[in-house]
Amino acid sequence: MSIAWLRERMEQWADHPAIVWNDHPFLYRDLLARLQMWHQALDRHDVGTGQVVTIEGDYSPNAVSLLLALIERNTIVVPLTRSVAAQREEFLDIAEVQVVVSFDDDDRWRIERRARPVTNPLTCQLIERGHPGLVLFSSGSTGKSKAALHDFIPLLEKFQVPRHRRVTLTFLLLDHIGGINTLFYTLANGGTVVAVPSRDPDVVCRAIETHRAQTLPTSPTFLNLLLISEAYKRYDLSSLELITYGTEVMPESTLQRIHALFPNVQLLQTYGLSELGILRSKSRDSSSLWVKIGGEGFETKIVDGVLWIRARSAMLGYLNAPSPFDEEGWMNTQDVVEVDGEYIRILGRRSEIINVGGQKVYPAEVESVLLQMPNVKDVAVTGESNPITGQIVTARFNLFEPEDPNEFKRRVRAFCRERLAPYKIPVKIIITDDKQHSARFKKMRRSSP
């Protein structure tokens, strides 16, 4: 059994809460009972080793226990959430899904079979090994979504090392590498997963207060929304001990404001990719963007200012794209970094860097300045092609209150002149009501060629 060690631990903590769902706690013994129920149900529906199965749901007791049962049965699991509803059929076809188990808001489920043979060589290779698998789709923020196929065994290996036991809010979705990491870290250490029905700041803060959550794994975009909403003023968040942030570059101004609001909470930058898993990390301190990453099973190197990683838990490959690994197993993350001893500072994706007359502009740096302006709710900075300078800096703003566009543009440039080099100042300024982030609470940028 591929996760016998996890089942043994869960049995030790039988009377402790494993999941809080719809504000109701479910004990580890409840999960184990549902796990047995699922094995019986999967037998009835002839779902076994080597089949490709989608879980459509969130962190409900039935969905989590099904995930565990599917791993024990050595199936290939494809978690999907409502955030990718528009791409559902495309994703099912790419992964060659044969069985879909869907959950409704009351945790009721139904099974749908699909007449689909498995032909992808990578999936066939994993099936021959007799190992459980995991397919994760990228957010598509830099282009078409890619399907990463993992062998679940090495991906779960690191969780066998005992670590801190915490009550953790599940902010990152179940179809995200960060969500999978949160779930298994928590279950492997006898902690409690607190599920939330939405990622609205008030909903999240209420759940922290009600269930005394100690850890909030989230994104810089959500932390900015938390600041904007001022939901932190309406709830008792004193139980929080740790806020982890990743998935995108953190604007320094956002980090400093969060640190000032929560001086007794440890702020930890995390780093991971769907292709590699989540690395262990250590921020220099809670107010610093300098971070040390690595840990057992991971190797890092910097080549021409870009981070490369080799991981024991690396995916087998993409189901719908060429492999990103070189002959020695290293992956170019495309993240440009600065180095200070053992620490790095992530500046941004190479594809998002704006080139203004040969000078590099990092969107997160400009956004960090613009977010300090009065009446600015959110901003996304991108590059736009220009026949003279190659590119110009473009900024799309969400405002709290309507403002005369011409006056606002003058205000932006005056504010920036004191804080940014001239080539970093936005040339094109757009006011929009459109959201600047995806369903995964990651900043959406689209640079023009």
Image: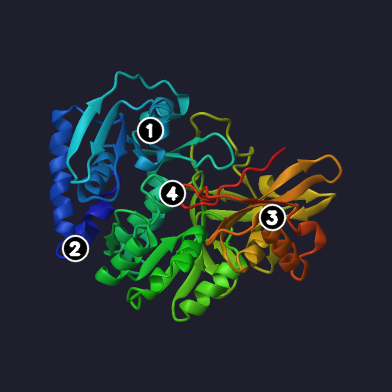
Q: Position of residue 444 (x, y in %)?
A: 56, 47
Residue type pointed to by label 2: Gln
Q: Position of residue 120 (x, y in %)?
A: 45, 24
| Closer to viewer: mark 1 or mark 3 | 3
How far is the residue under mark 1 from the one under mark 2? 30 Å
Q: Nearer the viewer, residue 305 or 267?
A: 267
| Closer to viewer: mark 2 or mark 3 | 3
Look at the image and tell me whether residue 434 can be seen: yes
Q: Quadrant of residue 217?
A: bottom left
Query: How dense is the environment of label 3, judged by Cα within 10 Å: few (below 14), some, or many (20 and up)?
Result: some
Q: Quadrant of residue 365?
A: bottom right
Q: Badges 1 and 2: C-beta atoms under 8 Å apart?
A: no
Q: Mark 1 or mark 3: name the one nearer the start of the chain.
A: 1
Residue at 39% from the left image edge and 69% from the top image edge:
231
Q: Quadrant of residue 5?
A: bottom left
In the picture shown, does residue 300 fall above or below 115?
below
Q: Nearer the viewer, residue 206 or 359?
A: 206
Query: How dense is the environment of label 2, judged by Cα within 10 Å: few (below 14), some, or many (20 and up)?
Result: few
Residue at the far bottom in the pictured view: 264
Query: How dense is the environment of label 1, judged by Cα within 10 Å: few (below 14), some, or many (20 and up)?
Result: few
How far is the residue under mark 3 from the one under mark 4? 23 Å
Q: Which mark is residue 12?
A: 2
Residue at disc 1, secondary structure: helix
Identify the residue under disc 4.
177
Residue type pointed to by label 4: Ile
Residue type pointed to by label 1: Arg
Residue at disc 3, secondary structure: strand
Residue at disc 2, secondary structure: helix
Q: Badges 1 and 3: C-beta atoms under 8 Å apart?
A: no
How far is the residue under mark 2 from the one under mark 3? 43 Å
Q: Mark 4 or mark 1: name the one nearer the start of the chain.
A: 1
Quadrant where the N terminus sits is: top left
